[in-house]
Image: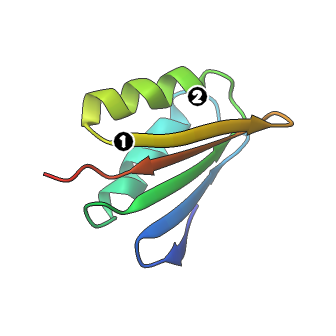
């Protein structure tokens, strides 16, 4: 589920989900954000790294950063500005 952290930042906990669910849920969550808003996604599926890079490239969003700590991947995506 996505939790509203601030008006322009949301956290989506996709831990335990396998491809393609983290990206599908992220796509839905980022659609609810204003342009320039940021989505923070937590995932445990190792394929999420390539999946989120491809998703951002295809959708025009910016993957501002990502990291991995103890098997949990964190992605921060800025919604595209048209």
Of pointers 2 and 1, the one earlier in the residue sequence: 2
Residue 21: image location, x then y, percent: 53, 37
Check the image and name the residue furthest to the right: 70
Quadrant in the picture for residue 47: top right
Residue 69: image location, x then y, percent: 81, 39
At a point 42% along the width and 57% down the height, the residue shown is 29
> Does residue 62 lie above or below 13 as drawn?
above
At a point 30% along the width and 60% down the height, the residue shown is 36
Assess disc 2: are there few (<14), some (14-19) or many (≥20) residues with their C-alpha within 10 Å of its C-alpha: many
> Does residue 5 lie above or below 1 as drawn?
below
Residue 4: numbered disc: none
For the residues bearing labels 2 and 1, Cβ distance under 8 angstroms? no
For the residue labelled by badge 1, is the local secondary structure a helix, a strand or a loop?
strand
Check the image and name the residue furthest to the left: 82
Q: Which residue is mark 2?
A: 48
Work out how far the residue at label 2 is from the one at label 1, CA to CA, in angstroms.
15 Å
Q: Which residue is mark 1?
A: 62
Nearest to the eye among marks 2 and 1: give it. Answer: 1
């Amino acid at each position: 589920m996505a939790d509203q952290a601030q008006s322009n930042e949301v956290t989506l906990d996709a831990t335990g989900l396998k491809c393609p669910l983290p990206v599908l849920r992220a796509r839905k969550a980022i659609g609810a954000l204003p342009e320039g808003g940021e989505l923070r996604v937590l995932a445990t599926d190792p394929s999420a790294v390539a999946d989120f890079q491809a998703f951002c490239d295809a959708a025009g969003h910016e993957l501002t950063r990502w990291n991995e700590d103890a098997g949990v991947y964190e992605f921060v995506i800025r919604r595209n500005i048209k």
